[in-house]
Image: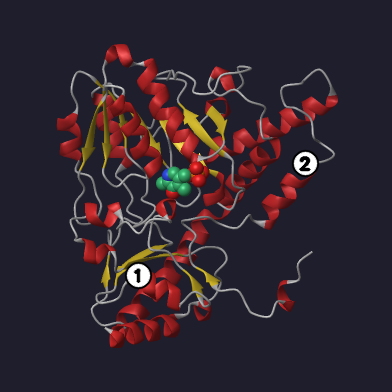
């Protein structure tokens, strides 16, 4: 075991919960037996070992379903939200190609959606990338007017991973239903953080990631509606016909159990936890405003994830700031998925801002690992900003 207290230096405060979250100790505990004593294959139900695993999978599926108002049979297990997005978009596109080759999405989506749509484009599909306003909101009228007789899918994320803007899901669902078009939402950042209900919101497909909700990495799920309408997908992984034929491959039983436990904890604690992190976030924002002249908010002032803050700090390069603060706080410039290149955030640019603003924007992601106001390194951030501004 690694003794954290004896390490020479304390680790920086973790404020990057949109990139990933630590596995909750209760989640880890729930998973442990399924690596060793209960190692059965959930598809081998001719004996006790398989039955134990299958039962654990069923229970976990029910917990995930409950958090979004779905039925357990509607939850397809995947390796993460990237795979879920691929399965939803490619699966619908391939299955429904005879009805049309048009998909509607928006410019601030995660790469898992944007790159999947690009793949469809190269295969002759037409994709509409809707613009967003200054707050990252997609315009409902634009969605509706983009729908044509060949439109088969609308894919709009539930909450943005950089600026935290929450989409009007219920209204989008209503539009989709009115035009008989399927509605997929990438809910990797929303699941377990804000209330979601697939029936109330008219959602047909919903992507989930384990590691964004204090579950393990390498596990996710796709909600696939079974009634009104019964959504059909072309599988992207062929094999033994697991997961109602939609996703073959031996089930990741410990991961599935972990995601189930993470969902169950979120169901019980989400309301209190979101109030707590919102209060911390609002405090952080007030303090940063008081100490950093010219600082501005990116994203929506109200319709945003309670643990998200994204700010523009004029005159400060975000990379330089993160280097200065490296030993104090773990922050991000936004998308971790393009971390090796220094391209400006496509999300900040989509809000209508220039590259300078994109290179001077920083994302804070609060979460369970931050307990107290005093843990927020506000002075260190303000000092680093002042130093960098002096240097230029
Ligand atoms: C993290 C994330 C993904 C990818 O999820 P993985 O489980 O890591 O594949 C997709 N979409 C959004 C919005 C995300 O935040």
Looking at the picture, the colour scheme in use is secondary structure
Is residue 304 visible in the rendered image? The answer is: yes
- 364 relative position to 108: left or right: right
Residue for point 39% across, 83% down = 384
State which quadrant residue 179 falls in: top left
Mark 1, residues whose alpha carbon is within 10 Å: few (<14), some, or many (≥20)? many
Q: How far is the residue under mark 2 from the one under mark 1? A: 41 Å
- 252 relative position to 71: left or right: right
* Placement of 10 over or under 21, stated as above or below: below
Residue sitting farthest toward the front:
341
Q: Nearer the viewer, residue 278 or 161?
A: 161
**Marks 2 and 1, the one that precedes in the sequence:** 2
Ligand 1 lies under 8 Å from the Cβ of mark 1: no
Q: Nearer the viewer, residue 162 or 341?
A: 341
Q: Nearer the viewer, residue 326 or 380?
A: 326
Write down the residue under mark 2. Answer: 35
Ligand 1 lies under 8 Å from the Cβ of mark 2: no
- Residue 318 got which mark? 1
Q: Quadrant of the C terminus?
A: bottom left
- Residue 215 got which mark? none
Expressed as whole percent of the image width and height from the top left, the position of residue 255 reads: 65, 41
Q: Secondary structure at mark 2?
A: loop
State which quadrant residue 37 falls in: top right
Is residue 195 visible in the rendered image? The answer is: no
Q: Secondary structure at mark 1?
A: helix
Expressed as whole percent of the image width and height from the top left, the position of residue 235 reads: 49, 20
């Amino acid at each position: 075991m690694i003794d954290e207290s004896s390490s020479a230096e304390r680790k920086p405060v973790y404020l990057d919960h949109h990139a990933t979250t630590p596995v909750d100790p209760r989640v880890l505990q729930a998973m442990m037996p399924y690596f060793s004593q209960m190692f059965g294959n959930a598809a081998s139900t001719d004996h006790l070992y398989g039955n134990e695993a299958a039962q654990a999978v069923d229970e976990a599926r029910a917990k995930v379903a409950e958090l979004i108002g779905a039925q357990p049979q509607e939850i397809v297990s995947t390796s993460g939200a990237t795979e879920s997005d691929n399965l939803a978009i490619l699966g619908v596109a391939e299955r429904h190609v005879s009805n049309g080759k048009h998909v509607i999405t928006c410019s601030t989506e995660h790469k898992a959606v944007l790159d999947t749509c690009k793949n469809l484009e190269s295969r002759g599909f037409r994709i509409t990338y809707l613009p967003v306003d200054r707050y990252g909101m997609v315009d409902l009228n634009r969605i509706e007017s983009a729908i044509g007789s060949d439109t088969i899918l609308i894919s709009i994320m539930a909450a943005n991973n950089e600026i935290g803007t929450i989409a009007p899901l219920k209204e989008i669902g209503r539009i989709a239903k009115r035009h008989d078009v399927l509605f997929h939402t990438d809910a990797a950042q929303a699941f377990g953080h804000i209330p979601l209900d697939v029936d109330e919101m008219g959602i047909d497909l919903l992507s989930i990631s384990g590691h964004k909700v204090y579950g393990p990495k390498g596990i996710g799920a796709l909600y696939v509606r079974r009634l009104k309408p019964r959504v059909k997908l072309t599988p992207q992984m062929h094999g033994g016909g697991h997961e109602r034929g939609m996703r073959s491959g031996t089930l990741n039983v410990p991961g599935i159990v972990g995601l189930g436990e993470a969902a169950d904890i979120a169901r019980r604690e989400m309301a209190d936890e979101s109030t707590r992190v919102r209060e911390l976030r609002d405090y952080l924002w007030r303090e940063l405003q008081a100490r950093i002249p010219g600082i501005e908010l990116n994203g929506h002032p109200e319709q945003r994830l309670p643990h998200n803050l994204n700010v523009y700090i004029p005159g400060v390069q975000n990379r330089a700031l993160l280097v200065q603060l490296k030993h104090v706080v773990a922050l991000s410039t936004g998308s971790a998925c393009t971390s090796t290149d220094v391209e400006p955030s496509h999300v900040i640019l989509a809000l209508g801002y220039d590259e300078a603003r994109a290179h001077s924007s920083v994302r804070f992601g609060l979460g369970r690992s931050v307990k107290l106001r005093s843990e927020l390194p506000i002075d260190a951030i303000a000092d680093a900003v002042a130093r960098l501004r002096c240097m230029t």
